[in-house]
Image (cartoon, rainbow, N blue to C red):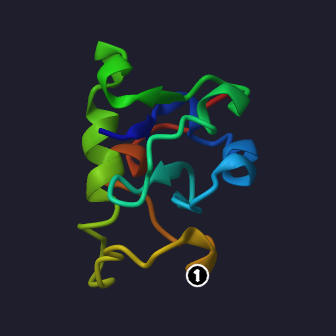
Amino acid sequence: MTYVIALPCVDVKDRACIDECPVDCIYEGERSLYIHPDECVDCGACEPVCPVEAIYYEDDLPDEWADYYKANVEFFEVTPGGVPPLGSPGGAAKTGALAYDHPLVAALAPQGE
């Protein structure tokens, strides 16, 4: 099991969760943040600090955002335009912000406008 970042994070990327994560498993895409499912230790430190309530334990993810579980997993496995898959680099600090998003997020209209 893992935590998942859903729609409310898109175009917000507050990053408070990144500061709280003890294992550095929250990665930054262009429009959203993503939790690496293999690096997350299920501590839950990220969930209460999210100001937009975008982070859910996998089993508690609302039905309308169920696709975000797959987006958080695939973000690390499938990348656009020939970019090699990220895999498990062992911490977001090693990668910095990434210049892509999962197609689910990339296809969304701008949020909050």
Residue 97: give x, y in percent of width and height.
61, 70
Q: Is residue 80 above or below residue 110?
A: below
Residue 5: give x, y in percent of width and height.
48, 38
Residue 53: give x, y in percent of width and height.
61, 23
Q: Residue at x 57, y 52 (%)?
A: 31
Q: Quadrant of residue 9?
A: top right
Disc 1: which residue: 94
Q: Residue at x 56, y 79 (%)?
A: 95
Count every numbered label the image shows and give the total: 1
Give the quarter of the figure containing the C terminus: top right
Q: Secondary structure at mark 1?
A: helix
Q: Is 87 in front, or is 1?
A: 1
Q: Is residue 65 above or below residue 45?
A: above
Crowd class of label 1 (few under 14; some 14 to 19; many from 20; radius 10 Å): few
Q: Is residue 88 above or below residue 63?
A: below
Q: Residue at x 46, y 75 (%)?
A: 90
Q: Is 21 in front, or is 111?
A: 21
Residue 112: give x, y in percent of width and height.
67, 28
69 displayed left or right of 47:
left
* Amino acid under disc 1: Lys
Q: Residue at x 56, y 70 (%)?
A: 92
Give the quarter of the figure containing the N terminus: top left
6 displayed left or right of 112:
left
Q: Quadrant of residue 111?
A: top right
